[in-house]
Image (cartoon, rainbow, N blue to C red):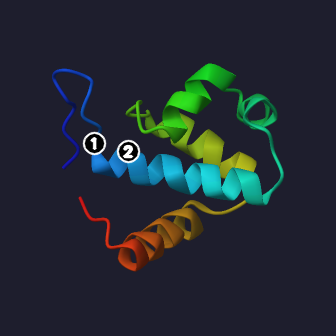
């Protein structure tokens, strides 16, 4: 379960993993953060916060990101699971 932090200093592991996955795929496609934010319809500074694990996104924004990456939600989350297993990062 994703729990927000009370101080805002400690980051939630699930949000960090999500942000890392977005950054990895964005860079693989050759997008700058600003261009990717434009493609998603999400402000660049907010996108930076997503990639740093600072925002707990609404489902609509998750789907905008996945759509801009040109993949299916199942593919994105399968990749997220595989990366978590490889790196040993778990919630």
- Work out whether residue 60 can be spotted: no
How many C-alpha atoms fall within 10 Å of the one at disc 1: few (<14), some, or many (≥20)?
some
x%, y% of residue 71? 69, 62
Residue in view at x 71 percent, y 35 percent: 40
Taking depth in this image into account, of 50 and 11 the one nearest to the observer is 11
Residue in view at x 73 percent, y 46 percent: 68
Residue in view at x 53 percent, y 71 percent: 79
In the rendered image of this protein, does residue 16 appear above or below residue 56?
A: below
Q: Is residue 66 left or right of residue 54?
A: right
Residue wearing tag 1: 12
Q: Secondary structure at mark 2?
A: helix
x%, y% of residue 44? 68, 24
Q: Secondary structure at mark 1?
A: loop
Q: Tags 2 and 1 in contact by the CB under 8 Å rule?
A: yes
Taking depth in this image into account, of 52 and 15 the one nearest to the observer is 52
Q: In which quadrant of the rendered image does the C terminus lie?
A: bottom left
What's the distance in space between the residues labelled 2 and 1, CA to CA? 5 Å
- Work out whether residue 62 can be spotted: yes
Residue wearing tag 2: 15
How many C-alpha atoms fall within 10 Å of the one at disc 2: few (<14), some, or many (≥20)?
many
In the rendered image of this protein, does residue 80 appear above or below residue 86?
A: above
Q: Quadrant of residue 54?
A: top left
x%, y% of residue 72? 63, 63
Total number of numbered discs in the rendering:
2
Q: Quadrant of residue 7?
A: top left
């Amino acid at each position: 379960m994703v729990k927000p932090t009370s101080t805002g200093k400690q980051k939630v592991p699930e949000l960090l993993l999500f942000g890392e996955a977005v950054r990895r795929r964005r860079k693989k496609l050759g997008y700058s953060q600003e261009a990717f934010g434009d493609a998603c319809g999400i402000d660049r500074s907010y996108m930076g916060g997503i990639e740093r694990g600072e925002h707990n996104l609404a489902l609509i924004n998750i789907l905008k990101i996945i759509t801009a990456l040109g993949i299916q939600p199942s593919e994105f989350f399968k990749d997220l699971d595989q990366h978590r297993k490889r790196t040993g990062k778990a919630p």
